[in-house]
Image (spheres, helix red, strand yellow):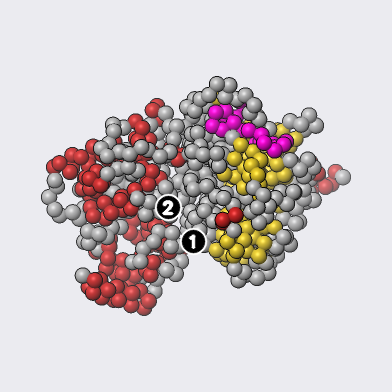
Amino acid sequence: MNKLVALAVAAAFAAPALSQDKPKPPPAWHQGKPAAMAESKLAPHAGKMTETPTGDIPVSKLKLPAGFKAELWASGMPGGRAMAVSDDGKKVYLGTRVIGRVYEVTDAGDKRTVRVVVDKLTQPSGVAFNKGSLYVFAIDKVLRFDGIAANPNAQPQDLTAKFDLPKEQHHNWKYVAFGPDGKLYVPFGAPCNICEPPSKEYAQIRRYNADGSGKEVIATGVRNSVGFDWHPKTKELWFTDHGRDWAGDKGFEDELNRVTKVGLNFGFPYCHANGQPDPDVKKAKACEGVTRPALLMGPHAAAMGIKWYTGKMFPAEYQNTAFVVRKGSWNREKPFGFDVINVRVGEDGKATSRPFATGWQEGGEGYKFWGRPAYVAQMPDGALLVSDEQTGAIYRISYQKPKAAAKKQ
Amino acid sequence: MLSLRVGRWAVALTALFLSPVFSQERLELCAACHGPGGNSVNPQIPSIAGQPKLFIENQLILFREELRKSEQMLPVVKGLKDPEIIKLAEHFSKLPAKGMEAGPANAALMKTGLERAKALRCGICHLADYRGQNQIPRLAGQREAYLEAEMRAYRDGKRTGGDTIMAAALYGVGDADLRALAHYLSRSSVERVSPGKVSKP
């Protein structure tokens, strides 16, 4: 239910003053809505918290380049989104938001089983697996389960106090991952659609030692990143970032950013996308010193998970290219996203993208989606897993050389 | 009052554990508190007839997962499987809703409630006639005391789990305004928004 909507909140600004009003807090995703859009019916899509039967997951509608195949790999995990794969690749852990659970999928080769590892948490969307331990990040809690892949009864260590989590909840659900430096990377979103964050602890990405010590802010001006991965060759961090809402169908566009060094500023709240100043939160030379995105991800696309591909299954042209998932727009009259794209970096260092997986959204104009892809993970055999937050399913995308192509060789 | 409630719960819970999940007994268990056909005769307990299907589903899940805390609802939903929840939601979403407030409307409260509902734009999400949609509940004809208590709980950060949007919508709204809103919304005509009579929004 990352959706409960209340356009009503807009009224706080536009409406006649109410008796006994107190000063308004930032009305989260609603802030920055212009008077011209006050009556807009656009609202976050209703999520789904019940299990979707496999018959209602039309995986055959997914479209992929020649030679690729998508199949339903696991299901029955309402709200499942970010995935963490265990060291041996036999277990996949999924975080969720509103339903408050972390799932564990066990791969038995020909079939998968699913269980709930932990529940009743406040949006435990961040999961990472490192050296035998599962790390779970809820908005207000950090848990570590040691040896859980072998011992389903492993009890969690509570590491919350080590991570210095700020109190605002909006945009502070997590994506977390371990970098090639062994550090744990954690984003802290801006607790609003558009605002000067209430304190310096928001709109940034930090890294920590695995035990929560050694906190270091590595990037600022980051509105809401819920996906990142490291380039296999350069070891640079690439992260997706959601653009602000209520600025019309054209944007501001989501970003794919490249962290070439520690300490870069990515612009929020003053500067968006390719150097566009914010119309509401202004300052002189808004874009000065702001690092531009490596690639724009499209308006309201909800760019989520990213994975640089290093597997051996896909054709060589995919080696060291990234798969980026766009969960799809809500703050836009016409749908955008609902797909997986493939991003490559050319010899000149420029990033470009091309479609990879589509078919979750059917038809052009209205919102007619049956699923919302969220994250990608790479399996030991080189297959790609794609999670779907709407259907609570994981698809496996594999590749086999098409017969026609095989004959030519 | 307490002993009466305990007695009713003993009966209800016995019925629960003896009955298959989606059955006449299960529906009677719901009706024991939420009223015949899901229209509540108890001012503190909400009517569930004609509520949007997704709203009922979500609330039952939130109760079951203990994300929306309720001592009354938890034992009832504990162990319910998703398909059973979907069936229950479907069942109650199709029942005709009735306005249950019998007391006379207070003109001053109605006037203030109308003004506040407009100012807070309740009708954008809950729709202009407050019938609700998808995950957003019907307010028209809902029990007055229940509406007031829930709005207060949202405002005071005590009803959490689903989202923070209602808390933000009601931030700083005074008790007198909440009372007026509940009075007005509970007396908004529910007959014209009953399922079957009005096409889906």
Q: Estimate the x, y position of residue A207 in percent, counting from the top left.
A: 66, 47
Q: Mark 1 points at which residue?
A: A120
Mainly helix, strand or loop, the magenta region? loop
Whole-Å distance between the Cαs marked 1 and 2? 12 Å
Residue at 37 percent across and 54 percent down: it is: B159
- Residue A264 colored in magenta in the image: yes
Give the structural element (helix, strand or loop) at label 2: loop
Q: Give the range drawn in magenta.
A: A256-275
Q: Looking at the picture, does residue B167 appear above or below residue A276?
A: below
Quadrant of the image occupied by residue A343? top right
Q: Estimate the x, y position of residue B150 in percent, counting from the top left.
A: 31, 53
The C terminus of chain A - image quarter = top right
Density class for disc 2 (Cα within 10 Å; few <14, some 14-19, many ≥20) is many
Q: Looking at the picture, does residue B108 appear above or below residue A247?
A: below
Q: Name the residue under label 2.
A: B162
Q: Is residue A335 visible?
A: no
Q: Which of A180 and B125 is in front in this view?
A: A180
Residue at 55 percent across and 28 percent down: it is: A270
Q: Which chain carries label 1?
A: A
Q: What residue type is labelled 1?
A: Lys
Q: Which amino acid does label 2 sit on?
A: Gly
Q: Which of A271 and B123 is in front in this view?
A: A271
Q: Which of B100 and A16 is in front in this view?
A: A16
Q: Estimate the x, y position of residue B186 in percent, counting from the top left.
A: 23, 49
Labels 1 and 2 touching (C-beta < 8 A): no
Q: Nearer the viewer, residue B121 or A223?
A: A223
Considering every residue shown, the one lying at the far top of the view is A284
Q: Is residue A66 left or right of residue A95?
A: right
Q: Mark 2 lies on which chain?
A: B
What's the mark number on residue A52? none
Q: Looking at the picture, does residue A151 appear above or below residue B176?
A: below
Instruction: Check if mark 1 and mark 2 are on a common chain.
Output: no
